[in-house]
Amino acid sequence: MKVLVVGATGATGQAIVRELQSRSIPLRALVRDPAKAQTLLGAGVEIVPGNVLDRYLLVDAIGDADRIICATGARPSLNIFAPLQVDYLGTKNLVKAAQTKNIQHFVIVSSLLTSVFFHPLNLFWLVLFWKKQAEQYIINSGLTYTIVRPGGLTNTPTSDPLVMAKADTLSSGRIPRSVVAQVCVEALFIPAAQNKIVEIITSPQAPSLPIAELFLQV
Ligand SMILES: NC(=O)c1ccc[n+]([C@@H]2O[C@H](COP(=O)([O-])OP(=O)(O)OC[C@H]3O[C@@H](n4cnc5c(N)ncnc54)[C@H](OP(=O)(O)O)[C@@H]3O)[C@@H](O)[C@H]2O)c1
């Protein structure tokens, strides 16, 4: 197994790289800025320059990876096309490249509430709407996928248990990026994670269950 992490210089992408490294899973990191990646990710990571908007370079960027974890996302900006480009068209390009390269599992970090059109988050240039279109494209692609929809992302570790729910079930809650990373990486090993959308947050009230069991229940 070798995993291409896309968006590896992002906050969640970095957590995914660390999670893979902690399990000694080979990886390559697709990044827009290799120098920044070298500083953020350290010397031992195989860094591949790329951009999800550049469709034709993506096939080469996948290289010898056979799994993809995608944690890209448009950063808030005045560019009204940013979520359309990055969250939808960029993901579509990556899916097409994944099909060409026969990728065995495509895991993506999406978001809670992608099905809710009239949500304030869509004031950021329809970001939820475009994420939803990307999810639908992945589902229709024929690839084996896991769509991970986290609640509000934090960088603060917690001992609160993980909550995992079916699509369009949760509407609020937060989760550390490190836990999102664990779920994305675990998904690669759990048959019950395949071809599912899961919504995740952490909660002090939740029972503490292994991730594999949570995937089975969804
Ligand atoms: N913030 C929240 O509370 C929240 C909640 C739920 C879901 N989410 C979603 O979770 C995901 C991860 O969030 P995050 O906060 O970790 O994101 P982030 O730190 O903003 O990272 C986004 C990553 O996407 C990369 N990227 C952007 N455009 C790209 C392009 N054209 N080609 C290749 N890479 C590109 C960025 O690269 P650079 O480093 O080069 O800019 C960066 O690595 C996002 O999809 C976000 O929308 C966020």
Image (cartoon, rainbow, N blue to C red):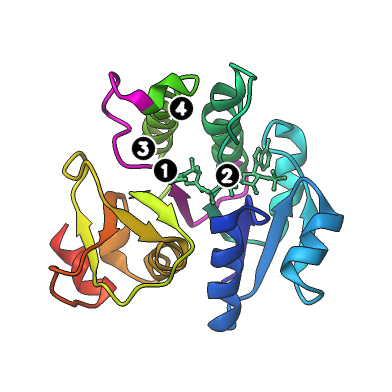
**Mainly helix, strand or loop, the magenta region?**
loop
Local SS, label 3 = helix
Circle 2 packing at 10 Å, graded few (<14), some (14-19), many (20+), is: many
Residues at marks 3 and 2 touching, judged by CB atoms closer than 8 Å: no
Mark 1 sits on what residue?
110
Q: Under 8 Å from ligand 1: the CB of mark 1?
A: yes
Q: Under 8 Å from ligand 1: the CB of mark 3?
A: no
Q: Under 8 Å from ligand 1: the CB of mark 4?
A: yes
Query: Mark 4 or mark 2, which is nearer the start of the sequence?
Result: 2
Mark 4 sits on what residue?
127
Asked if 107 appears above or below 186 in the picture, the reply is above
* Distance Cα–Cα, label 3 vs label 1: 13 Å
Q: Position of residue 22 (x, y in %)?
A: 56, 82
* Distance Cα–Cα, label 4 vs label 3: 18 Å
Given this view, does label 3 or label 1 mark the residue nearer the observer? 1
Given this view, does label 1 or label 4 mark the residue nearer the observer? 4
Query: Mark 3 or mark 4, which is nearer the start of the sequence?
Result: 4
What type is the residue that disc 1 sits on? Ser
What type is the residue that disc 3 sits on? Ile
> Tag on residue 139?
3
